[in-house]
Amino acid sequence: MAKRSEKGSLFLLAALAAVTVVVVAAQVKMVVAVNYTDEMEKCVRGVVEDPKNKPNAPGLVRLLFHDAFVRGLDGSVLLTSTPFNTTGNSLLANLKGPTEQGSLSNGGLRGLEMIDEIRAKLAEKNITASCADAVAFAAREATYVLSNGKIKYDIDGPGRKDGIVSAVEDPAKFLPAPTYYYEELLTNFTSKGFTKTDLVALSGAHSIGVAHPLAFSFADRFLPTATFGQNQIDPYYRSFMLLETKDFTDPQVQLNIRDMTPTTEKLSGYKPNGVNTSAVDVLDNSYYNANLQNMVLFTSDSALRGNAEQLLEDYKKDANLWSAAFGAAMTKLSNTLKAEGPLFEDGYRKKCSATNHDNKDAYPSLNI
């Protein structure tokens, strides 16, 4: 009997050990990677470099900033539907209205369709990533691709939370407006833990992408007051910008004069000073050359002259110095601006444009 009992005990222990191995194996498979691995990099970069996607790659850099600066990096900018899209005292109201995408501050967002594609490609490799993770990963690889491999920065791997709140009024509260003067810009950035160096370095992202005249984001640059002070603009450039925008009827215009027509560059008096004018939509330090010539579209760009002029000069002269500063600031955007909540998905969103449930009552009470 004793032997039979011993055998039974051994069998039980073996069975428990087997179960433990199965459970541990299952847990290991579900563990979120801490690091952003080479395999993840390859998957994400492949999506960004796809010919159908690459034209919208500049939008991915902007997408990270517009997500992280509002509610922390939580993918809220991706939502088009959520029962939690109001703020303040009515946070728990089951209302369905415009999300952050409806804000004028978010006009012309591009690249959103790549986020779910990136998650699907990662899932094929058994890598689980949140929508917020995918925003960070996409911006990193877009930066690498658009800079022709010159900017590669460190970021954390998967583990960011997906928010379920996205309110139309929030972007205007937290994003710096293109009409901001320097003092407003610096206050905005420092409130998020960013420095003057970060501000000037991230402004270099305006070497790529487009502006939207119909949103009147730079209409103030054509007022009589735009001839002096922080709003100053080169008069020849200003005249040709009116032609480029077709008197503000064109839906979009290139941000960087380097990327405009040769005629506009020549007649505006633009001096390349070593800038490769054939390198359209390349993320580089050409922005600083244009800014120091008063040839930038936004007041928020012009305002850096006279207030951060030494940094503008430094970044104009030294592309490597700017690349390092830009990469460091992008790391901060990706890693330090954590999702603020207080409401999150229980896990990750199934589809990045919508919360997993369309009614607040479907979420666990502890999450509310």
Image (spheres, rainbow, N blue to C red):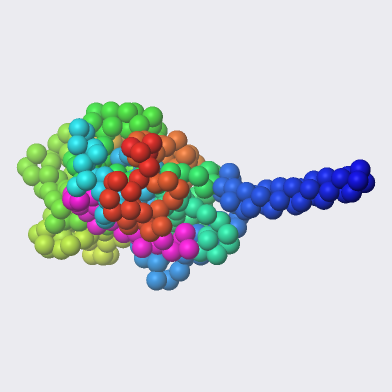
| Front in this rendered view, residue 5 or 354 | 5
- Locate residue 24, reporting x and y percent: 68, 48
- Locate residue 30, reporting x and y percent: 58, 51
- Locate residue 310, reporting x and y percent: 37, 32
Q: Residue at the spot x=26%, y=45% of the render?
A: 84
**Which quadrant: the C terminus?**
top left
In the rendered image, the residue lying farthest to the left is 224
**Residue 147 in sight from this viewpoint:** no
Q: Is residue 306 above or below residue 93?
A: above
| Front in this rendered view, residue 114 or 320 | 114
- Name the image quarter holding residue 275: bottom left
* In the displayed structure image, the side of residue 128 where residue 17 appears, left or right: right
Asked if the stretch drawn in magenta spans residue 361, the answer is no
- Locate residue 181, reporting x and y percent: 21, 34
Q: Which residues lie in the magenta part? A: 96-120
- Name the image quarter holding residue 353: bottom left
